[in-house]
Each structure stands twice: as C-alpha cells, then as structure tokens.
Image (spheres, rainbow, N blue to C red):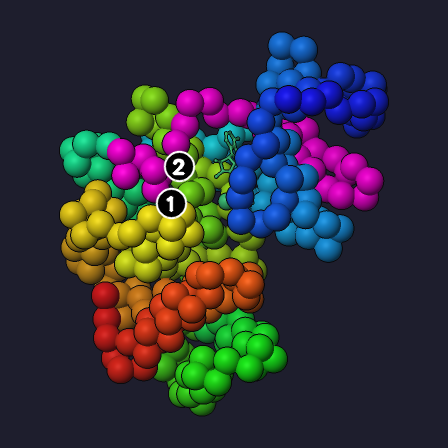
Amino acid sequence: MGRIKGKHHPRKGKINLHRIVQFRGHSGCNIELLTNGAKRFVRKISFDKTYNERLRRQGDVLRQLSQIRNNLFRVPEIYNEGYMHGKYFYDMQFIGNTQNAFFYLENCHPNEAISFCDKVFDIIKLFSINRSERSNLFLANFQKLNDLSHKIKKLNFKDLTKCIEYLISDIKRIEQLSELEQTLSHGDLTLDNILIDTNHEIWLVDSLDNDSPHYFYDIAKLYQDLEGHWGYLYNFIPFNPISNVALCHELLTEKIRKTFKLYSKYHYYFLGLTFLRIVPYVLRSPILEPVKERALRFLDNFMKGAEL
Ligand SMILES: Nc1ncnc2c1ncn2[C@@H]1O[C@H](COP(=O)(O)OP(=O)(O)O)[C@@H](O)[C@H]1O
Ligand SMILES: [Mg+2]
C-alpha cells in the first residue's frame, strides 16, 4: 500500500490517492486499485506513450459493450480518463471478489462450468447478431498476416516463416472472409479477461479495438485457452485432461460447430494467428517454444484443411 503524492486529478483538483493493490496483466500497463477517501477504483495507465491510443480505444470498446442491454455480462463503468506524464489512463469501477475465468474453472463445480459455458456461448451469439457495416475481415487479416510475417522473419524462426509464407501464397483460402459484416466484438476474450464474481456474474475487461471487429476473433481467443491451454502454459500448471477447461472445450465446440459453421472452417486459421501474435511478446520466456509449437501446429492444421 502506498500514497501517491500530489497527483492532479483532471476534474477534482488535488486529491489523495492510495494504492491498495497492483494487478498483473499481459499488456505491460500499470493497473492498480486506488482509494480516494471512501471511493475505490481501478486505474489502468498506458504502458508508454505509444500505447496511449490503443488504451484510449480500449475504453471506447468497453463503453460500447456497456450500452448493450443484456443479462449475460457486465462491464466496469468508466469514471474518468486523462493523462499523467503524457501517459493516458482511465479509471473504472472496481469489481471486488472476482476470479478470472481460468482460475474460476480450475476451482468451480462442473455444473458451474456448464452454466459458464452456456453464458459465454450466448454472449458470442449476442455479439454475432449485432451487425453493422460491411467488414473486410479478409483485407484486415491479410494486413495482419503481412505484419506478423515481417516480425517473425526478423526473428529468424525458419519453420514459422515458411508456414506464414505458404499461407500468404495461398491467401485465396480466406477470401470468403471479405463477405462478412462487422459485428460486436470484445477483441481479446481470453479467460483471464473474463472476471467472475461471487454471484457467478460475468464481467468483461481489457477489450481490444479492431478496425474490422468480428466475433470470430472472440471465439478464437476463447480457444487460446480451451484448445491452446494458454492459462496452463502461462501459469506453469500442467494441463489436466479432466478439468473444467477440458469440459468447456467439449461443450463449446459442440455448440459452435452447430451454430457457426463458417467459423468452424476458419477455426485453425484464427487460432494459429492468435498464437502467432503472442510469439514476439515471449521471446525471452521459457514458454517461447510451446507458443511457437502451437502457432505452427494450428496453422498447419488449417493448411491441411482441418476444421473445428
Ligand atoms: N475493474 C477491475 N476490477 C477488478 N479487477 C480488475 C479490473 N480491471 C482489471 N482487473 C484485474 O487486473 C488484471 C489485469 O487487467 P487487464 O485490463 O486485463 O490488463 P492487461 O491489459 O495488462 O492484460 C485482470 O485480469 C483482473 O484480474
Ligand atoms: Mg488482460
């Protein structure tokens, strides 16, 4: 716990902020639970100035999601935003007594896991019906693939580079994605961005803005954990094949196959990209090899025509 001296609050002038807890995330942003007298809130401060715009747009997506009337999920209210030493921050409602969905599933009763799956599936369905203008998921993906290809090439990972180049040369395979419309999307729907409170209510945090938002990305992010076992990898816990995560994998797959046939066709493409995107962030980590292995395995599955 520490006192943050003499910060100037954008609206209220000088105030006394006390830090209670520092949270850990993946982005490198500073996320802390602060008090200002009786009021508690979470402040998320940009990792550095180059991240400002991304974090600002994250706030926009959270606000957009909070406008959706539903009884499936909630979003922390954003109270305030501003800049500190040139770094953007936003202040949001603190959701107390929560666990992220990975640890929730590790600890809960299988019946609760089943009900969690049902809700998550309904959230995806809700996102999928909120359509707006035409998206060009094909172009957006082609761009992403090219950007990633440059990054990976520089890293000299030969097998991954070869795999991406092969994908780019056969880009016609994802052409069908140019016919999709934009939908609502959280953008980074991994299990650790889903918080569950003591009433088993779902809270979504840490969204990601995308020029072509689409619920396909959300499904793929869920599979980052369900099939890619990201939570186990990241937390150095061995995967347990009779866990609730495995149960959710089975249940969600059954529902998604039936309802989102087009997604199923592109599943390994999106899942491969999800792991590919992680590669540059884990270069000095012991999980680099397993992350590379997953990116390669899933993209390879796609190239061989495997579906969900
Ligand atoms: N409003 C909130 N209330 C309670 N806990 C939060 C809140 N926002 C974030 N957290 C906690 O902090 C963690 C990291 O926050 P997140 O926004 O996901 O950061 P990152 O972008 O770095 O992954 C979350 O997984 C969650 O445990
Ligand atoms: Mg996060």
Decide: marks 2, 1 in contact (CB < 8 A)? yes
Residue type, label 1: Leu
Residue 126 drawn at (x, y percent): 34, 44
| Left or right of residue 224, residue 46 in this image | right
Residue 187 drawn at (x, y percent): 47, 52
Which residue was labeled with disc 2?
A: 100
Q: Is mark 2 within 8 Å of ligand 1?
A: yes
The residue sitting at 81% across, 44% down in the picture is 86
The residue sitting at 64% across, 51% down in the picture is 54
Decide which of tag 2 and tag 1 comes sooner along the chain.
2
Looking at the image, residue 24 lies above or below residue 130: above
Q: Nearer the viewer, residue 1 or 212?
A: 1
Residue type, label 2: Asn
Q: Quadrant of residue 272?
A: bottom left
| Name of the residue lying farthest toward the top | 38
The Cα–Cα distance between marks 2 and 1, rounded to whole angstroms, is: 7 Å
The residue sitting at 42% across, 23% down in the picture is 97
Looking at the image, residue 79 lies above or below residue 262: above
Q: Nearer the viewer, residue 296 or 303?
A: 296
Looking at the image, residue 36 lies above or below residue 265: above
* Segment colored magenta: 79-107
Q: Quadrant of residue 197?
A: top left
Magenta-colored stretch includes residue 88:
yes
Q: Name the secondary structure under disc 2.
A: strand
